[in-house]
Amino acid sequence: MDRLLRFWALPRREKQLFCEAGILLLLSHLSIKTIPFRHIDRFLRTRSHNDAREAVDVAEFIKLADVSLSRVINLSPWKSLCLSRSMAAFIMLRRRGIPAVVVAGVMFSEDSSLHAHAWIDTGHTGPNANSEHSAFTAIMRIGQEPMVADSTPNRPR
């Protein structure tokens, strides 16, 4: 009951993002379990160039989307994989025209086991955000590269 009261106390926008995050996280979780990844990859690549549907403050929306996904993951009965979370975040961001890239990476641990991880790169993260992923070697990137301040406008992608 306490969770329901906390949900109703949220601002309307956060309630909407919570519901959107819940639906997208469930769909991405089910997609990973049932659909070959080549189809998921093709779907995400077609969504990587969508135009903005609404005007948003990019940094604020990235933070709200992350908080909404975290709330849903904490309440969900299934174990949410980083790939599911990355797919859901990617779709939420691209629906609003925010450049984002799903990055999948691997690393070897000290006991020679292979670890994989997926995350979102938006170019709007804090200074320590990339340090948590620096141990991983990126093997796949899906999406529109975030704009870098010192990049040239006709840079090949």
Image: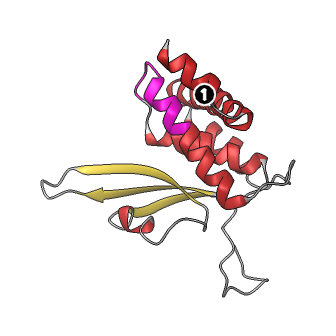
Does the magenta segment cover residue 113? Answer: no
Q: Secondary structure at mark 1?
A: helix
**Residue at 62% across, 45% down:** 65
Compared with 98, 77 (above or below) is above
Name the spot of residue 92 as percent of width and height, x first: 69, 43
In the displayed structure image, the side of residue 3 where residue 43 appears, left or right: right
- Of residue 81 and residue 76, the one placed in the foreground of this image is 76
**Residue at 43% across, 18% down:** 77
Does the magenta segment cover residue 71? Answer: yes
Compared with 15, 41 (above or below) is below
Name the spot of residue 11 as percent of width and height, x first: 69, 35
Q: In terms of image quadrants, where is residue 21?
A: top right
**Residue at 66% across, 67% down:** 145
Amino acid bearing label 1: Gly
Q: Which residue is mark 1?
A: 22
| Residue 38, visible in the rendered structure | no
**Residue at 45% across, 63% down:** 138
- Of residue 38 and residue 26, the one placed in the foreground of this image is 26
Compared with 9, 143 (above or below) is below
The magenta segment is: 69-79
Name the spot of residue 32 as percent of width and height, x first: 53, 31
Crowdedness of circle 1 by 10 Å Cα count: few (<14), some, many (20+)? many
Per the picture, the main secondary structure of the magenta-coloured stretch is helix
